[in-house]
């Protein structure tokens, strides 16, 4: 059969173009709606983004909701953290989103600005509002309304290997200068002081805040990453690597950080409460946690954490509100802390005996109290990609710290139109 | 296609119609329905056979393409496209902006950087894959013990889903505890930053793509080789041609038609090889391995608000480049006398 190669090529190219536009499906359809005579019924679909260790606990907790409300079925779905934001957005725009979504603190403004989240002020979802810690609560606000309820809060801290520090005769460092000063001591015992992630810009934030800088000043609508403090932060990271005080990779950072820390190749790493379970498995009692080392100006790390959001188009609003209330209640939060050492978002939970006795909570609570809030703007998440590219460019030697800071600033001004 | 199944008997019908049409002004009121009915009655079977294909192609290719073209001429992003949230429907509010998106992209250095690397990546991958595939095929195209085993082993990469192999490669390439650096370390060679250095990352992605692409080339070339009549080789041997002469004068011309097709297909696939790049390096470090499609993906799915218009613009430009390439390729083939 004779066939035009041009047509074949066009058809092949088209087929490829078409396959690139796959859609994500999501289930959020319940059969019956709302409360009938005070008793809740329906199916609440809950998308959880927690990691493997955490997922078991959250699934059990979510499904325990069925015991309290016989008419309600909870459909628990674990979605990968990496693409959860996009999957939710795709599903939400097509009315296929889950009823309840575990929403990262920086996603709330993004989802809310697109109209995907249910305003929760005055609904059953928000119970005893004053009990929530002020910083996590701030992340649920957008445009003067409440769009989510805090689940867990977190921040970054310094994880250290007690045995290695003792062997090298080094005190827990309070500043990055201390870290650099300890290089020789650790070298003598065959270790490097610190692991620095070069592939994930979130881990760059302690350096940035430590020099007194920030990504943007949301109130003044100004980009601040390329000011003096921003450049200093890039320089600080580069000098840590250059001086041999830190190991870094621009790919596979998480795996390499966890394995080098577990093997004792590095004595310290910067990490969050979500790594406590894994790090404890690796080091046991040798694991110590301290505040992030200070930069030239101060000691600060970013506020992270998760919230529960309710999809604006949910047909099961009442059951969903009740589910969120239950999941964010003091009793549930206490169980999460007992089993996973994650930090509760309710002040009252910190009074519970089991929580007070938790070593990780004892450390992380003061750190969270002074954690640096991130800009709660819809574009918050897209500020990371340019930063990642610039940090990689600097670490691979294709840009100076000053250029890296300037490039990031330019990219931010493209993303945030009309900002200075 | 419709012509191919035209039943006999069509020609008399047309012939009968012609003189009537030529005789003075046609009465428009009844002529068209008559023709339509006649056409339907003669071709209905062909149309019925073609309809599903047309419908499917229209839905899965035509509509997305037209929509993509349209979006590239607007300022659409996720904040202004139509959305359905529960019972509410938010209408689309994006506007037509003409060719602004194209001008912006073409004026941007990023596009030309990515294009340069994409071309290099495609040429390197296709060139190496083809050479390896042809070499291996020539080696396997003879009878020897364990031939089936060899063939199976070489086709194996094809039997594994691409993303699985890419993840496996990523573990091999890991700078600190990957097997590759472990082996090099035992040989006293310093660790190679496979995925962390811009140049090495480029080498790594090409290596993985070649590994993935060789089986296809191998099978295609093996098929081509087996279609070359053995008599030609025998005759050449009788004439005293050595192995190299037999290869250049019989094998190469013999596999040419197949080679041309697979090179074209392979070029198109490699040009748009999203999974290898994205899963291995995410385009990093610092965008050094980003090809055009991964950049388009970033615009559509990573930035927030997701920029559908710009992403569509990149998509259309990629399509145009591939179509231009295919046309040029075809012209070059024509010049060399290939009947395609």
Image: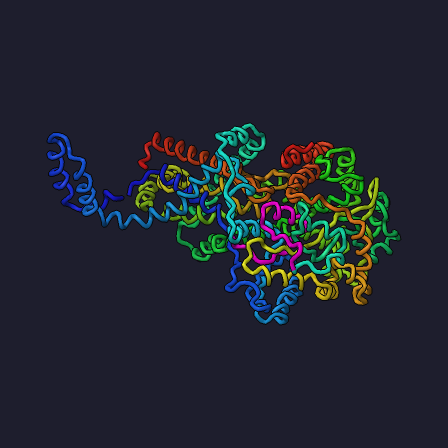
Quadrant housing the C terminus of chain B: top left
Magenta span contains residue A112: yes
Residue beneath the point at 18% across and 38% down: B29
> Residue shown at 71%/53% (left/top)?
A305
x, y percentage for residue A44? 57, 62
Q: In which quarter of the image is the N terminus of chain B?
A: top left
Give the answer, above or below, for where A23 lies relative to B106: below
Is residue B189 at least partly visible in the picture? Answer: no
Front one among B59 and A408: B59
Q: Specify the quadrant of the image occupied by residue B66.
A: top left
Residue positioned 55% across, 51% down in the render? A92
Count of labels in the image: 0
Query: Front-most of B110 and A255?
Result: B110
Question: Bounds of the magenta span?
Answer: A95-123
Give the left or right position of residue B282, taking residue B317 as reference.
right
> Looking at the magenta stretch, what is its main secondary structure?
loop
Q: Position of residue A22 (x, y in %)?
A: 49, 49
Task: Identify the residue at image location x=39%, y=39%.
Answer: A10
Residue at the limit of the structure toward the front, as seen here: A37
Instruction: From the viewer's perspective, tell me whether residue B243 is left or right of residue A88.
Output: left
In-front residue for pair A327/A299: A327
Residue A171 appears anywhere in the view: yes
Name the colour scheme. Answer: rainbow
Residue B170: x and y in percent read 60, 50
Viewer-proximal residue among B226 and B33: B33
Q: In this view, does B220 lie to the left or right of A63?
A: left
User: In x, y percent, where is residue B226?
Assistant: 35, 48
Residue B288 falls in image quadrant = top right
């Amino acid at each position: 059969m004779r066939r035009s190669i041009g047509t074949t090529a066009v058809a092949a190219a088209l087929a490829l173009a078409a396959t690139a536009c796959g859609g994500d499906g999501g289930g959020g359809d319940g059969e019956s709606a709302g409360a009938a005579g005070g008793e809740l019924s329906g199916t609440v679909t809950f998308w959880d983004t927690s990691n493997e260790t955490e997922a078991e606990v959250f699934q059990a907790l979510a499904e325990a909701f069925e015991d309290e409300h016989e008419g309600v079925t909870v459909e628990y779905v674990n979605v990968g953290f990496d693409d959860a934001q996009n999957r939710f957005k795709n599903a939400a725009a097509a009315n296929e989103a889950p009823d309840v979504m575990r929403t990262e603190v920086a996603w709330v403004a993004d989802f809310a600005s697109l109209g995907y989240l249910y305003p929760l002020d005055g609904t059953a979802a928000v119970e005893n509002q004053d009990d929530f810690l002020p910083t996590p609560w701030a992340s649920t606000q957008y445009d003067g309304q409440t769009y989510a309820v805090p689940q867990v809060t977190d921040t970054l801290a310094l994880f250290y290997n007690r045995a290695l520090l003792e062997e090298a005769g080094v005190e827990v460092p309070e500043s990055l200068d201390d870290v650099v000063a300890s290089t020789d001591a650790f070298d003598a015992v065959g270790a490097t002081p610190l692991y620095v992630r070069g592939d994930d810009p979130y881990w760059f934030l302690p350096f940035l805040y430590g020099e007194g800088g920030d990504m943007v000043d949301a109130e003044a609508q100004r980009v601040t990453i390329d000011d003096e403090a921003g450049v200093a932060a890039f320089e600080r990271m580069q000098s840590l690597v250059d001086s041999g005080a830190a190991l870094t990779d621009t790919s596979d950072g998480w795996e390499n950080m966890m394995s080098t820390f577990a093997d004792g190749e590095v004595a310290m790493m910067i990490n969050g409460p979500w790594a406590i379970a894994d790090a404890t498995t690796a080091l046991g009692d040798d694991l110590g946690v301290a505040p992030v080392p200070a930069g030239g100006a101060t000691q600060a790390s970013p506020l992270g954490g998760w919230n529960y959001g309710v999809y604006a188009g949910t047909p099961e609003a009442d059951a969903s509100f009740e589910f969120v209330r239950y999941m964010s209640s003091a009793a549930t939060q206490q169980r999460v802390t007992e089993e996973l050492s994650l930090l509760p978002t309710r002040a009252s939970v910190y009074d519970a005996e089991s929580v007070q006795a938790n070593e990780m909570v004892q450390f992380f609570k003061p750190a969270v109290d002074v954690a640096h809030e991130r800009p709660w703007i819809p574009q918050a998440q897209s500020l990371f990609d340019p930063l990642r590219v610039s940090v990689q460019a600097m670490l691979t030697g294709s840009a100076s710290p000053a250029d890296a800071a300037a490039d990031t600033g330019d990219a931010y001004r493209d993303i945030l139109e009309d900002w200075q | 296609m419709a012509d191919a199944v035209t039943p006999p008997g069509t020609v008399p019908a047309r012939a009968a119609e012609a003189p009537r049409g030529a005789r003075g002004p046609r009465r428009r009121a009844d002529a068209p329905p008559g023709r339509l009915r006649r056409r339907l009655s003669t071709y209905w079977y062909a149309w019925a056979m073609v309809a599903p294909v047309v419908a499917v192609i229209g839905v899965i290719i035509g509509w997305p393409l037209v929509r993509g073209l349209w979006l590239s001429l607007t300022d659409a992003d996720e904040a202004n496209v139509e959305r359905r949230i529960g019972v509410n429907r938010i209408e689309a509010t994006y506007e037509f902006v003409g060719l602004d998106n194209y001008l912006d992209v073409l004026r941007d250095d990023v596009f030309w950087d990515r294009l340069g690397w994409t071309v290099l990546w495609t040429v390197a991958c296709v060139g190496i894959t083809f050479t390896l595939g042809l070499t291996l095929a020539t080696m396997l195209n003879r009878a020897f013990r364990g031939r089936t085993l060899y063939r199976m082993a070489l086709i194996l990469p094809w039997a594994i889903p691409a993303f699985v192999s890419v993840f496996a490669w990523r573990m091999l390439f890991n700078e600190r505890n990957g097997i590759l650096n472990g082996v090099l370390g035992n040989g006293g060679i310093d660790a190679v930053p496979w995925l962390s250095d811009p140049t090495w990352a480029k080498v790594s992605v090409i290596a993985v793509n070649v590994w993935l692409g060789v089986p296809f080339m191998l099978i295609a070339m093996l098929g081509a080789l087996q279609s070359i009549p053995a008599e030609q080789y025998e005759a050449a041997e009788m004439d005293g041609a050595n192995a190299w002469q037999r290869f250049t004068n019989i094998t190469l011309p013999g596999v040419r038609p197949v080679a041309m097709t697979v090179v074209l297909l392979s070029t198109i696939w490699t040009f748009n090889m999203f999974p290898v790049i994205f899963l291995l390096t995410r385009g990093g470090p610092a965008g050094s391995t980003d090809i055009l499609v991964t950049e388009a993906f970033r615009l559509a799915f990573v930035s927030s608000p997701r920029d559908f218009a710009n992403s569509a613009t990149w998509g259309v430009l990629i399509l145009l480049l591939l179509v231009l390439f295919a046309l040029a390729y075809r012209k070059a083939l024509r010049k060399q006398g290939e009947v395609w």
